[in-house]
Amino acid sequence: MKLILAVLPPERLAPVERALAEVEVFRLTVTDVQGLELDTDGSPRLEPRVRLEIAVNEAFVEPTIGAIVRGAAGSAGHVLVLPLLEVVRVRTGERGPEAI
């Protein structure tokens, strides 16, 4: 299991959601955040971003990354992939890959 975090410009959210749906990834959390960027003169400024958090089973890691990259093509952003040690679905008590 992996946790995929992506930080993107807000205008890329809809295309990324469509691309994720094409690879059958429907469960994600989206948070409004700010990213620190540098102006052309080198001074820092905060820019609005969205952060996607997506827990996936191993078979969905590469399709999910590919969908994010396709949906966000041409924009600033990044994707992080972290190991996910445990998942528990609160409603049912399911654990592990079945909870995703």
Image (tube, rainbow, N blue to C red):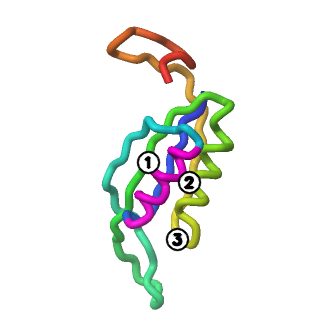
Q: In this picture, is 2 found above or below 7?
A: above
- The residue range painted magenta reads 11-22
Q: Which residue is mark 2?
A: 68
Residue lying furthest top in this view? Answer: 93
- Quadrant housing the N terminus: top right
Mark 2 crowd level (few <14, some 14–19, many ≥20, 10 Å Cα): many
Q: CA distance from mark 3 to mark 1?
A: 15 Å
Q: Earlier in the sequence, mark 2 or mark 3?
A: 2
Q: Position of residue 19 (x, y in %)?
A: 54, 52
Q: Is residue 10 magenta?
A: no
* N-term-proximal mark, 2 vs 1: 1
Out of 18 and 99, give the one closest to the viewer. 18
Q: Is 14 positioned to the left or the right of 64 in the image? A: left
- Asked if residue 85 is positioned above or below residue 56 in the image, the reply reads above
**Res 44 quadrant in image:** bottom left
> Percent x, y for residue 24?
55, 38
| Amino acid at the residue labelled 2 | Ile
Find the distance from the CA under tag 2 to the CA under tag 1: 10 Å
Looking at the magenta stretch, what is its main secondary structure? helix
Q: Is residue 48 above or below residue 31?
A: below
* Residue on which the image places disc 1: 52
Q: Residues within 10 Å of mark 1 (few under 14, many from 20)?
A: many
Q: Within the magenta stretch, is there residue 19?
A: yes
Amino acid at circle 3: Ser
Say if mark 2 contacts mark 1, CB within 8 Å.
Answer: yes
Q: Secondary structure at mark 1?
A: strand
Tag 3 residue:
75
Where in the figure is residue 48, as x and y percent of width and height?
33, 66
Q: Residue at the spot x=52%, y=69% of the render?
A: 76
- Residue 80 is situated, as x and y percent measured from the top left of the image, at 57, 48
